Amino acid sequence: MTGPHSPATDRDLAAAQDAGGFVACGLEHPTQPEISVLAKRADFLSVARALHRATPGFVVQARQRSAALSGAVGIRVGFTCSKKVGNAVARNRAKRRLRAIARLVLPAHGKSGWDYVLIGRAGMTATRDFAEMQTELEHALAKIHALAHRK
């Protein structure tokens, strides 16, 4: 039994992925910055000391990595929710929503070489309208980048 793709299609897909592009349904998309996840406490703390912007649904913290750091290309993002947000189920739901919004917004509005942390807010992140939160993240990123450009 053969898979849903012919070998030629799989070869084309592998070549496109090696070139750094995304391929879906045979259509190539422009290369987006690579997004990775912040995992170390030191990274979260360094972002917390930098720029931030509060929105009704969440707080965005951001910092531009120095060029001296290895791997200063690509976007890194972290997510956190305190116990004020609720129990583990509520915190995980809020973080899932933040991850989904970051996946949609950061490739277009984030900048390569920057770290971002999205912090969930009690009673808002899990229940706020998804489209509003997307718009809030877009505006917050624009304000943060404008502020960083002025400095």
Image: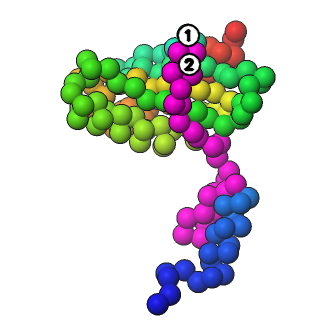
Question: Farthest bottom residue?
Answer: 1
- Between 56 and 115, the one lying in front of the other is 115
Vertical comparison of 38 with 13: above or below? above
Of the residues shown, which amino acid type is indicated by label 1? Arg
Q: Which residue is mark 2?
A: 42
- Which picture quadrant has residue 65? top right
| Mark 2, secondary structure of its residue | helix
The image's mark for residue 60 is none
**Quarter of the picture holding the C terminus:** top right
The region drawn magenta spans 20-46
Give the image location of residue 8, x and y in percent: 66, 81
Vertical comparison of 36 with 128: above or below? below
Of the residues shown, which amino acid type is indicated by label 2? Ala
Give the image location of residue 129, x and y in percent: 29, 35
Which one is closest to the eye, mark 2 or mark 1?
2
Say if residue 128 shows up in the picture: no
Q: Which residue is mark 1?
A: 49
Q: Residue at x 43, y 29 (%)?
A: 79
Label 2 crowd bin: few (<14), some (14–19), many (20+), radius 10 Å: few
Q: Residue at x 63, y 27 (%)?
A: 114
Q: Considering only order in the chain, which callout, 1 or 2, is on the residue closer to the N terminus?
A: 2
